[in-house]
Amino acid sequence: MKKIFLIYILFAVFSTVFTSNSSAEGLTSASNTIELVQEHSTGGHHVLPNPIMVLPFVILLLMIATGPLFYHHFWEHHYPKVAILLGAVTSSYYLFYLHDSISLLHTMAEYLSFIALLASLFVASGGIYIKIARKSTPMLNTLILLLGAVIANIIGTTGASMLLIRPFMKINQNRIKPYHIIFFIFSVSNIGGALTPIGDPPLFLGFLRGVDFFWFITNIWYIWLPTILLLLTIFYIVDMRNKEESEANKDYSGKITIKGTKNFIYLAIILISVFIDPAVISWVPSLSPLPFGIREIIMFSVVYLSFKTADQECLKANEFDFEPIREVAFLFVGIFATMIPALQLIGATAKEMGAQLNAGVFYWATGSLSAFLDNAPTYLNFLSAELGKFGMDVNSIPDVRAFSQGTVDPVTPLFLRSISVAAVFFGAMTYIGNGPNFMVKAIAERAGVKMPSFFAYLIKYAIPILLPIFVLVWLIFFS
């Protein structure tokens, strides 16, 4: 409780401007705040941060990477304080030196939206127990990952990850290896969710800006499908070599048992609430000047209700506890705060150089940054730069719609495809590339799986497996 209070203190430092800063009037939800900040950050009166203010983010990233490896005891006990302290440094700089409360309000709104979605899906899915009474085989594992990749577009990468990671581990409990979890992160927690705005937050931001809901599936499926199939083929070959099994003679009924089905209602409520936003439905009321909307209230209510009404046997069978979401909450409050300078500097540079950039450059720029920064604001910055390249405005829904449909220039859908694919796919490159990655890692570690460190994940798995695939995607579709 004390540490949760510290998070509140971090945001309270700059939330006092709500009642005094007239430029913050009209803020209601993450989408409203994003629009205001986008206007603010691209306007002539905006003061860019000193590049040295990227240091808190770099320090936090390095500590996330090295802490569990070199100073585990300190990191395990003090990472919340480190994240909040570094976030407070950046927040204080913006509030007291730059007098830029808008960027902080935007970050607060985005963080609350982010953690509300992750927490609600985490708790609601934690009350659903799925047992597959089948023998673990490479083919069964591959089919589960394929199923997860498909349903990630229906209940989001977070929902699919939280729903399937525990049964996936239980099926493989006699032969579980780190690569099982890593390929799960690759396919279910990231690449799978590239076909709908529900699948991954960057695409939802595009939808809020004016991209048609079905644009993503019609424009990305032919990139998504071969990528997923190639990735799962690699997994199948790797899993075929895993011969370590016990209980070889055990009888399996073949049944699939699902308990706690009432929690599917909570999942449905969460998915419906995603669209309860003034930017999507005009009659949805504003909660100005609060940095959240009705959507976040519904999601946080689901966190409480789904846990209080959950089947205790399901929670016990899933070995459910709040540590994974707690870790994500503390680390990402620091990440969201400290990445503000980096995102603004990147956004400004991208707009200045927009005329010189082609779709391939946007693909690599969006992808490489989405691996280390939150992919939603990264996507929005490069979307703004792409529209600026063609003399269009990211804050104009008709402009975004025309950009996605290619009515002004037939090449513009290619540019939108490049950043949409990159933002989702490259989130799998690191543990911090997408929120579900850290949650899946934490759940696996709680179950006794020895997961690789930040650098080991990147060097041993992401670079040799994902990077060649992403190069192929670039060569075939964006070069």
Image (cartoon, rainbow, N blue to C red):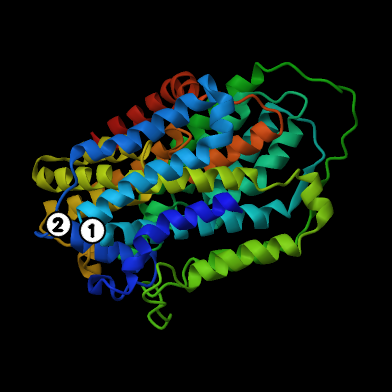
Spot occupied by residue 118 in the image (x, y as percentages of width and height):
54, 53
Q: Marks 1 and 2: which is nearer the front?
A: 1
Q: Quadrant of residue 85?
A: top left
In-image side of 318 versus 15 (left or right): right
Question: Would residue 268 appear left or right of 404 to someone viewing this image?
Answer: right
Mark 2: amino acid: His
Q: Secondary structure at mark 2?
A: loop
Name the amino acid, label 1.
Asp
Q: Are marks 1 and 2 in contact (CB under 8 Å)?
A: yes
Asked if 143 appears above or below 386 in the picture, the reply is above
The residue positioned 38% from the left and 54% from the top of the image is 203
* Badge 1: residue crowd in 10 Å (few <14, some 14–19, many ≥20): many
Q: Secondary structure at mark 1?
A: loop
Q: Which mark is residue 100?
A: 1
* Mark 1 to mark 2 CA distance (whole Å): 9 Å
What percent of the width, then of the height, locates residue 446? Answer: 68, 35
Question: In this orientation, does residue 217 appear?
Answer: no
